[in-house]
């Protein structure tokens, strides 16, 4: 990386990295769950070694999200990425119909489970997924599981917590 960047670019990169390291340490210190601390570290490590410029605001936001998500939350997000993630490589969003149909391919299937709503509502609050509007053919008496669609920010989050983890195993 040093061969492709100017001295000024490297200095800026080092300054941003140092600030993010302090932010990661602060977040890790206030987080009691070891797996959350590990995810914060992975985000920082992956951001620092990426050849592109570090977007400090994005990385700070991703570390904030990592400090809040449980392993179960991340498991659900990874499952949605298995289903819809490859589609987002070529487009900016997944059409509503496709997301609605693909939803049942997840390990949750089509069952109605409050945990699914709880986890995905939390993921939605961080901008990683978005709730799909229910079909307009339902009556108020219909009982169905809410469905969600993956957003690019969700893919980015998982890519930041996955890269180094894959190297270790």
Image (spheres, helix red, strand yellow):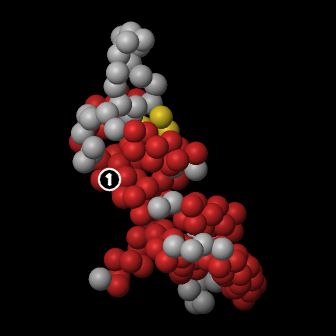
Point 43% across, 39% down: residue: 117
**Image quadrant where residue 106 sits:** top left
Point 46% across, 25% down: residue: 133
Q: Can residue 104 be seen in this snapshot?
A: yes
Please tell me how many numbered marks the rendered image carries: 1
Q: In the rendered image, which residue does mark 1 sit on?
A: 79
Position of 24 compared to 143: left or right? right
Q: Position of residue 137 (x, y in %)?
A: 36, 11
Image quarter (top left, top right, bottom left or bottom right) of the C terminus: bottom left
Q: Position of residue 41 (x, y in %)?
A: 54, 79
Q: Position of residue 5 (x, y in %)?
A: 64, 83
Point 57% across, 74% down: residue: 32
Task: Determine crowd level at label 1: few under 14, some 14-19, many 20+ residues with C-alpha closer than 10 A.
Answer: some
Local secondary structure at mark 1:
helix
Viewer-closest of 74 and 150: 74
Work out whether 32 lies above or below 58.
below
Point 58% across, 45% down: residue: 125
Q: Can residue 17 be seen in this snapshot?
A: no
């Amino acid at each position: 990386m040093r061969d492709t960047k100017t001295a000024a670019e490297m200095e800026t990169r080092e300054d941003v990295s140092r600030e993010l390291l302090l932010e990661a340490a602060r977040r890790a210190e206030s987080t009691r769950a070891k797996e959350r601390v590990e995810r914060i570290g992975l985000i920082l490590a992956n951001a620092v070694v990426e050849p592109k410029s570090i977007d400090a605001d994005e990385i700070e936001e991703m570390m904030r999200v990592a400090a809040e998500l449980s392993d179960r939350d991340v498991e659900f997000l990874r499952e949605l990425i298995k289903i819809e993630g490859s589609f987002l490589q070529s487009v900016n969003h997944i059409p509503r119909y496709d997301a609605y149909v693909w939803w049942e391919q997840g390990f949750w299937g089509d069952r109605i489970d409050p945990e699914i709503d709880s986890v995905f509502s939390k993921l939605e609050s961080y901008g990683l997924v978005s709730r799909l509007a229910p079909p307009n053919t339902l009556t108020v008496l219909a009982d169905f599981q809410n469905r969600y669609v993956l957003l690019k920010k969700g893919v980015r989050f998982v890519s930041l917590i996955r890269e180094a983890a894959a190297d270790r195993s």
